[in-house]
Amino acid sequence: ALRSTGHETRGTPKPSTSVAPKPSAHAAPLAMLRSGRAAVSADWASTTVSSRKAGDELSSQLTSRLAEKNYKLENFHMEDIRSFFWWDSKLQEEDEVRATVDSEVPFPVLMEALAADHPYDLPMIVSSALLPEGQEADHKYVMGMAVINGTQEDVAHGLAKSVVEVKFAACAQVEKNKGSDSDFTITLKTLGASKAQVMLEFGGLSWEWHPIQANEKYLKWLEDNVEVRPHAEL
């Protein structure tokens, strides 16, 4: 999540990894998308705020705005995360709260309602891009997720920071998986063209990629803060 005054604007040891992840906050919504349930609806939308108090306020405002359009807010849940991102040409890191909305409300409606009262000047409002089968691999904007099992928090943070530091992703978020003090999920927001370099340079992790849609200003920010390098430079 990004903001202007304040992104309210925005050497790493090799971790042990596993391909048997524990569920993260995005797991249920993504499972629904894979099952084909989300034919015309968003099913979920995600944003970030500075605190749980700010999240509660946004939830209340969102409920009111959706009610005005005869929609109902089904589920609004929050997770504590550590965010790494580029802002004002500097690598920033902040403790934030990711708020995820599970809903049958169409994404354009959710996006407009979230943006209307969002405390950030440039918020991240993201959902899965619902594409015809076979077109996912060519989508311009993607979210990458990887699980690190049996490691320390500073190792997970260091790895996420490294991906953003080299501009393979514009944003990385780390969340501690529920029920564990040593398992973490790293979530990247980046360009589809950057997937290959992420997997080449950070191939010790098993990345799962999903096409995303988002508010226009956030997508422009992604484009401005990801660098896709020729293979010879890696």
Image: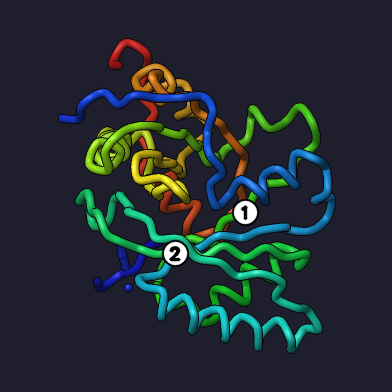
Q: Nearer the viewer, residue 210 or 4?
A: 210
Tag shown at residue 48: 2
Q: Quadrant of the N terminus?
A: bottom left
How far across and how far down the image is residue 159, in percent? 29, 34
Tell me, yes or no, if residue 171 can be seen here. no
User: Distance from label 1 to label 2 (Cα)?
Assistant: 13 Å
Tag shown at residue 127: 1
Element at label 1? strand
Image: 125 above or below 232: below
Residue at position x 67%, y 51% in the image = 29
How far across and how far down the image is residue 104, in percent? 78, 64
How far across and how far down the image is residue 89, in percent? 22, 51
How far across and how far down the image is residue 117, in percent? 51, 82
Q: Quadrant of the C terminus?
A: top left
What amino acid type is highlighted by mark number 1? Ser
What amino acid type is highlighted by mark number 2? Thr
Q: Nearer the viewer, residue 98 or 183?
A: 183
Element at label 2? strand
